[in-house]
Image (spheres, rainbow, N blue to C red):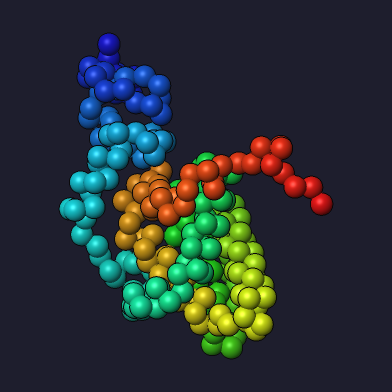
Amino acid sequence: MACPICEKRKAKRYCPAKAENICTLCCGTEREVTIDCPPDCAYLVESRRHEIGRREIDWSQVPFADVKVPSSFVAAHEPLVLALGYAVCLYARDNAALTDPDIVAALQSLAESYQTLSNGIYFEKPPDYILQRELYDALKAAIENFKKTDSRNAGVVTVRDSEIRDVLIFLAQLGATRSNGRPKGRAYLDLLRSQFKSEELQKPSPSQLVLP
């Protein structure tokens, strides 16, 4: 049987995204490009394992290339890092089309907004693309919720705008360095998902919903 993508080579490899066999070359070249690969595809998992070891990062192309966020800062602000990562995962749960480029764009735009805020001048420019803009808003809401929780626990708001900015920069840089650059790539998203239990990211059933 010929590969349904190229219609030339023999279809030898089962593609869970297409629910049929495709050729090995199309699997390699179209993976996360035209094929919307599920995260548990064995060929996708294996390819990412090899890519990480061979990938060369051009730091001049990474968001906020002149900013280096110390690992000590990230460790000290782990609750906020996890809260924002969780917000990304929740949005992705309900919006399957979200990709790594969308996540990085939303994080970068929000970090730029907080950069101006920490300098005393607030200027906001959300992304134009709807998925990126909605994620941008979801992250803003997560930050406000974190501030409220932080205030209740400590009696005062302890997280500063400059710290929120640097957490966003860290997450944007992490996304840029973990993404494989493919238009449908979700290596970064899957990394964020791995930080949480799978059941935490499942949609609630009607019996789990708490009505006001």
- Numbered circles on residues, count: 0
Q: Position of residue 27 (x, y in %)?
A: 28, 31
Q: Position of residue 178 (x, y in %)?
A: 33, 56
Q: Is residue 8 visible?
A: no
Going 31% across and 51% down the picture, which residue do you hit?
180
Q: Nearer the viewer, residue 60 or 76?
A: 76
| Location of residue 202 (image quadrant) | top right
In the rendered image, the residue lying farthest to the top is 1
| Location of residue 76 (image quadrant) | bottom left
In the rendered image, the residue lying farthest to the left is 54
Q: Position of residue 139 (x, y in %)?
A: 58, 63
Q: Nearer the viewer, residue 79 or 33?
A: 79
Going 45% across and 69% down the picture, which residue do you hit?
78
Height in image: 41 above or below 165?
above
Going 27% across and 45% down the picture, which residue do you hit?
48
Q: Is residue 87 visible?
A: yes
Height in image: 27 above or below 52?
above
